[in-house]
Amino acid sequence: MLQQLASMFFDRGKSKEKEVSLDTILEPMDRHLDNFETLVRPAPESKPRTPFASDLPSEQNSRRNLTLQQKMKIIPDAIPLMINMKRSASMYDGTFQPTANEASPEFIAELEALARAAGAKDIGYVKAPRNAIFRDKGIPYEYAIVFTVEMDQEPIETAPSFECFHEVLQGYKNLAVISNKMADFMRKHGFAAYPGTALGGLTDYPHLAELAGLGAIGYHGLLISPGEGARLRINTVYANIINLPTLEAQGKENEHLWVRDFCAMCKKCVRKCPVGAIYDQPRPRGDGGMQTIEHATCRDYFSANHGCAVCLAVCPFSHVGYEKVQARFKGNPDAPQFRITPWDDQRSVNEELIIPLTQ
Ligand code: SF4
Ligand code: SF4
C-alpha cells in the first residue's frame, strides 16, 4: 500500500491504465471490515462513496505533473500521510479486544486535550446513522468521534494552486496523525477505537460533523464551522463508547443551521465555480441528505488544477469569518428549509425523511 500511495504522488508519465488511483489504494482497507462481527451496515438508500478517479488523460492531471521542487516540498507531508494511513488501516486487523465501553467525563476531557494538543480544532460526537455509511461499506461501531483540522487562509486563498494543494495535503496528514493518536490513547484505556481514513473514508464526514453539531453543510457541500468557515478537513474515530456526549445525549440542537439560510442569498460558490459544478439549489438525493455538486463536472477540473478548492476559498465564512457573517446577517425568511435528518430504521427515507424545498 505504501508503494501505491507513493506512486500516486510521485510517479510521472504512467499510462492511464497503469495509473494508481486512490480508489484502488483504499479498497484493501475497506476489505478489513470483514473482520468485524459488530459491523454496522449502511441503509438501503445510502449513496456510494464518490470515486476519486477522473477520465482526464494522465498528462493533464496536475498531481502527476509536479515539478521536482514541488515534489520535494510535499515529501515532509506526503510520507507521514502515507505511513499514518497505513497504520490506521492496520488497526482494522480484528485483533483488538475491548475491556470497557463507558467513558468518564474526565477521560473525554483528557482525550479532547490530547487531540487539541496534536492540532485538532473542533471535536464532536455522534451515533452514526446508517444513511451516513457509504453503500457496500460498514463501520466497526456506530459511535464516532468527529474532529476537524484548520487549513490556513493565505494558501487557501490562492486556489486553485500548488500552494493550496500543499495546504490541503498538510490537512490530510494532520487528520491521519491525530486520529491514530486518539485511537492509541483510547485503546490504552480499554476502548475499541478505529481511526477513519483521512482520505476517502467509510462514512460521509460532513454529514456526521453536522449531526455532531460542529457546523452546517453549505451550498458547496462542505462543512462550515464557527472557527474556520469551510477551511477545514474532517476525520473520525469509530468507537464502542456508548455514552459519548452527543448533541442528542445533551438535549441540544445544532445551532449552525442558519448558515444555509445565508447560503440561499449568497451563492458565491455557485457563481465562482470555474466549471459550474455547484447546483443553484441543493437537490434531495434520496438518502435523507442533499446533493450539492455535480461530481462528474467537478472531478476533471479538480484533477487538472491541484484539487481546485475555489469554492471553499471564496466562501465568506472562510474569508471574513463565521462571526462577522452572522453579525451582519439579518435572516432570510424565504430560504428553502431543509436539514440532514438522522436515519431511523422505523421510517422510510423516501416517504418521510426528505423535507421538500419550499421554492
Ligand atoms: S459561498 Fe455562499 S452559498 Fe456557497 S457555501 Fe459559502 S456561504 Fe454558502
Ligand atoms: S472544487 Fe472547484 S470545480 Fe469542484 S465544485 Fe468546488 S469550485 Fe467547482
Image (cartoon, rainbow, N blue to C red):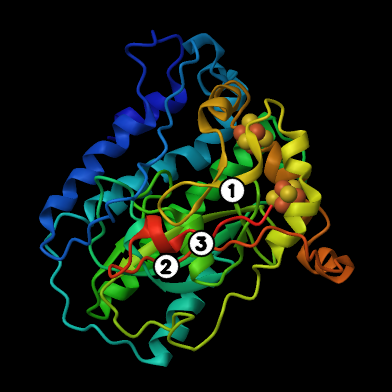
Mark closest to the chain's N terminus, 1 or 2: 1
**Residue placed under numbered mark 1 in the picture:** 221
The residue depicted at 50 percent of the width and 54 percent of the height is 174
What percent of the width, then of the height, locates residue 197? 37, 50
Q: Report the front residue among 163 and 136.
A: 136
Q: Nearer the viewer, residue 148 or 52?
A: 52
In front: label 3 or label 1: 3
Residue 256 is situated, as x and y percent measured from the top left of the image, at 66, 70
**Quadrant of the displayed image that contains ligand 2:** top right
Evaluate if marks 1 and 2 touch, with contact meaning CB atoms under 8 Å apart.
no
Relative placement, left or right, of 238 versus 335 is: left
Q: In this rendering, would 141 be left or right of 67?
A: left
**CB at disc 2 and ligand 1 closer than 8 Å:** no
Regarding residue 178, the answer to whether it shows in the image is no
Q: Are marks 2 and 3 in contact (CB under 8 Å)?
A: no
Residue at x 54%, y 41% (from the top left corner): 169
Amino acid type of the residue tagged 1 in the rendering = Gly
**Residue 329, position as x, y percentages in the image:** 85, 66
Query: Disc 1 beta carbon < 8 A from ligand 2?
Result: yes
Nearest to N terminus: mark 3 or mark 1: 1
Q: Secondary structure at mark 2?
A: loop
Q: Count neighbours of disc 2 (C-alpha within 10 A) and say few if under 14, some if 14 to 19, many if 20 or more.
A: some
